Amino acid sequence: MRIIAGPPVSGADFKFRSTEIALATQSLTDGTSLLVKGWRRIGKSSLLVETARVLAETPATTPIYLDVQDMKSLSEFFSGFLRALPADRVQWLRKQWDAARLIPGRIADAVQRRVRKVSAGGGGIEGGLELDASVREYWEPLKESVERLAREQLAQGNRIILLIDELPFFLENMHRQNKNVDDIRIVLATLRAWRNAGLTMAIAGSVSIQLFLEDLEIEGLVINDLQHVNLQPLAQLEAEALVVQLAGIAKLTGWTPASTAALLAELPDHFPFFIQTAMNQLRASGSSTPEQIADVAENSLQQQLFATFYQQFDERLARRFEPGIRGAAEAVLNAMAKDVHGKISNAAIDALCEPLGQDSLAVKRRLELAEFVRGDPRTGGYRLVQNLLKTWRAARGGI
Ligand SMILES: Nc1ncnc2c1ncn2[C@@H]1O[C@H](COP(=O)(O)OP(=O)(O)OP(=O)(O)O)[C@@H](O)[C@H]1O
Ligand SMILES: [Mg+2]
């Protein structure tokens, strides 16, 4: 294992999450598709990459990891998919297109050339807008050829499994370009059709796809067949074990149980990313006593971790809440931040929303979809999803 604070981790660098990995690998090979949820930096991409790695060692499965964060069009998405597909499967598709005269040869050539060019490291996008238009025009047969491929593979005892990272970013990129939601609908309907054909998938994203679809008034129907996997911070014992292991890797002499306790006390939540970032800084400065740890936390760690998260929270509040509902949402968040456990009752939410003239049901729904709070179906109350939200409200003068 190494200390890695930033990019997705897998293999020996990937720790814990054994339940999630088991759920993902078993569900996906049996035919159930997943939506991986959780705050930024909780480890969603790592879960996808590690799942792909495990599946690659599983007979009769072809896992494909596809990061769509920077894609902006249907044709980029389709060529990205082809690029990740094993070459023999791409050839099978090409034969389909040609034999049934589904796709004009010049378009198939252009798509394939783009696949080759990018995978050769060229990075150039050939055809540009023209190819985009052609791919959209022939989208239906292209989409259906992949359905046939998935069925054909299943019939031969092999399942293609797609791990799509940052789908909401891709959808937002498309929306920003042409301001219509047609292409978003096309992508979502395509993925749904592929799933129905037996191509299972896990979809992840660092913004809530449900919130995004609701904003665009696209009904959740297109993703309601996905089983949700909610990634949580590490448990106390896991966090302690990770700290101790990384302290060993960092060769921090004089590391004691008191050091572990001191470090964890500085971190608002047990995100593996927080622990990795902290250990990376402690290693650089050779800090291992509780005093040294407190020093590093105060002088660099808190700033680095808190600032980026606060900015995300601010953005989500500003972009995903209309001004009216935002005031009520902030009032609820402030009240929760004041509670030691970050909790609030249903009645208390009602009492806050009423004088502001806001529908408390709508406020609760938005807060939950934005992943600020989580509902407790038993008590009907709510709790903050992470402790960092408390200090954020305090920093913003809310409490
Ligand atoms: N299972 C894990 N074991 C060890 N470290 C992990 C694990 N998962 C995540 N991390 C740490 O968190 C960092 C971020 O992980 P990852 O990129 O998977 O998060 P993410 O949820 O996809 O983030 P983003 O929302 O920004 O896309 C990694 O670089 C690593 O430091
Ligand atoms: Mg990610």
Image (cartoon, helix red, strand yellow):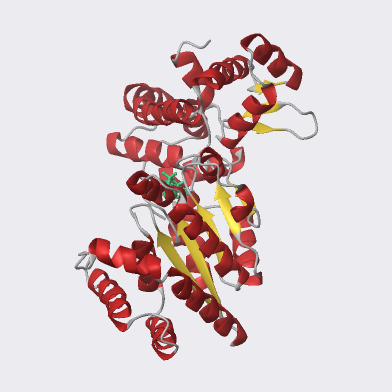
Determine which quarter of the picture holds residue 72: bottom left
Q: State the count of labels.
A: 0
Determine which quarter of the picture holds residue 10: bottom left
Q: Residue furthest bottom?
A: 99
Q: Residue furthest front?
A: 137
Q: Is residue 145 above or below residue 313?
A: below
Q: Is residue 140 above or below residue 206?
A: below
For residue 191, say whether it is visible: yes
Q: Which residue shows up at 48% across the image and 59% down it?
A: 186
Q: Quadrant of the N terminus?
A: bottom left
Q: Is residue 27 above or below residue 285?
A: below
Q: Nearer the viewer, residue 322 or 310?
A: 322
Residue 244 placement (x, y as % from top left): 48, 43
Residue 41 placement (x, y as % from top left): 45, 42
Q: Which residue shows up at 55% across the image and 69% down it?
A: 194
In the rendered structure, the answer to whether residue 319 lies left or right of residue 32 reads left
In the rendered structure, the answer to whether residue 323 lies left or right of residue 82 reads right
For residue 289, say whether it is visible: no
Q: Is residue 228 above or below residue 134?
A: above
Q: Residue furthest right?
A: 378
Q: Which residue shows up at 49% across the image and 20% down it?
A: 323
Residue 103 placement (x, y as % from top left): 38, 80
Q: Nearer the viewer, residue 371 or 324?
A: 324
Q: Nearer the viewer, residue 133 or 252?
A: 133
In the rendered structure, the answer to whether residue 321 lies left or right of residue 229 reads left
Residue 367 placement (x, y as % from top left): 59, 29
